[in-house]
């Protein structure tokens, strides 16, 4: 699954993926306006322990894009452990 968005004249994408080695699924926010595409942030759900982790890989990612990523993660309804 992939969702595209234009923001301030640039293209961004949220990509849903899975990683067997880390036993997780993730949503990854990328800047698609230039090549190579640049990963800006990601939200990871670790299946076995139910832990959700947010990571930001670049400085000064506009807050509306972070909010968009978090809103998309919330739609996934990943179960959380306390």
Image (spheres, grey):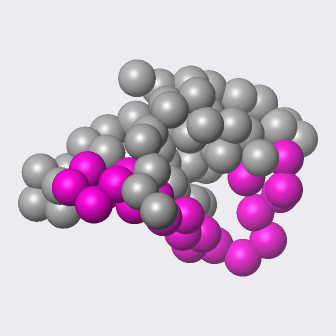
**Residue drawn 21% across and 55% down?**
48
**Residue drawn 76% across and 63% down?**
61
In this orientation, does residue 22 appear?
yes
Picture coordinates of residue 71, whole percent (x, y): 69, 37
Quadrant where the image shows the N terminus: top left
**Residue most extreme to the bottom:** 59
Vertical comparison of 21 with 72: above or below = below
Q: In this view, does 75 lie to the left or right of 25?
A: right
- Queried whether the magenta region covers residue 81, the answer comes back as no
Q: Report how many numbered discs are placed on residues in the image.
A: 0
- Queried whether the magenta region covers residue 46, the answer comes back as yes
Q: Quadrant of residue 40 in the image? A: bottom right
Picture coordinates of residue 58, whole percent (x, y): 63, 72
Q: Quadrant of residue 55 in the image? A: bottom right
Q: Give the range drawn in magenta.
A: 44-66
Q: In this view, does 59 lie to the left or right of 8?
A: left
Nearer to the camera, 34 or 43: 43
Q: In this view, does 13 lie to the left or right of 8?
A: left
Nearer to the camera, 6 or 81: 81
Q: Quadrant of residue 79 in the image? A: top left
Nearer to the camera, 60 or 21: 21
Picture coordinates of residue 62, whole percent (x, y): 83, 57
Nearer to the camera, 74 or 65: 74
Vertical comparison of 61 with 17: above or below = below
**Residue drawn 66% across and 46% down?**
70
**Residue most extreme to the front:** 82
**Residue drawn 27% across and 60% down?**
49
In this orientation, does residue 44 appear?
no
Q: In this view, does 1 lie to the left or right of 73?
A: left
């Amino acid at each position: 699954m992939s969702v595209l968005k234009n923001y301030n004249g640039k293209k961004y994408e949220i990509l849903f993926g899975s990683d067997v080695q880390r036993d997780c699924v993730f949503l990854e926010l990328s800047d698609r306006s230039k090549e190579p595409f640049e990963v800006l942030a990601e939200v990871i759900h670790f299946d076995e322990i139910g832990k959700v982790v947010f990571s930001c890989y670049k400085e000064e990612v506009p807050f509306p894009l972070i909010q968009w990523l978090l809103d998309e993660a919330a739609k996934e309804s990943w179960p959380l452990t306390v």
